[in-house]
Amino acid sequence: MLQEFHNKLNGVKIAPGPRASFEVSIDGKLAFSKLKEHRLPETKEIREKVRAAITQG
């Protein structure tokens, strides 16, 4: 994803969270939560959410 969006993102942050959590936020807004969805996201899902956030800019 960094290769695809390198010129459109200010950065990517990976931070530890509560046990068994996996969350993706874009500009401070929760885009995906393993705790809510009860599954890990597909890479395609995250790419689509990043792409949508970039175009909404």
Image: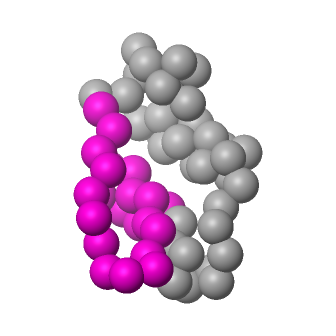
Residue located at (32% from left, 50% from top): 14
Q: Is residue 38 left or right of residue 7?
A: right
Residue reaching furthest to the front: 19
- In this image, 57 relative to 38: left or right? left
Residue 31 appears at what percent x and percent y?
49, 62
**Residue 7, can we see it?**
yes
Is 4 in the magenta?
no
Q: Is residue 52 visible?
A: no
The dominant secondary structure in magenta is loop
* Image x and y of residue 39, in percent: 67, 75
Quadrant hosting residue 36? bottom right
In the figure, 5 relative to 25: above or below? Answer: above
- Location of residue 21 with respect to 14 vertically, above or below: below
Most foreground residue, 16 or 45: 16
**Residue 13 place in picture, x, y as percent:** 29, 45
- Answer left or right for 39 relative to 6: right
Q: How many marks?
A: 0
* Residue range corresponding to the magenta coloring: 11-31
For the N terminus, the image quarter is: top right
Rendered residue at 53%/42% (across/down):
50
Q: Residue at x 28, y 64 (%)?
A: 16
Is 20 located above or below residue 6 in the figure? below
Quarter that holds the C terminus: top left
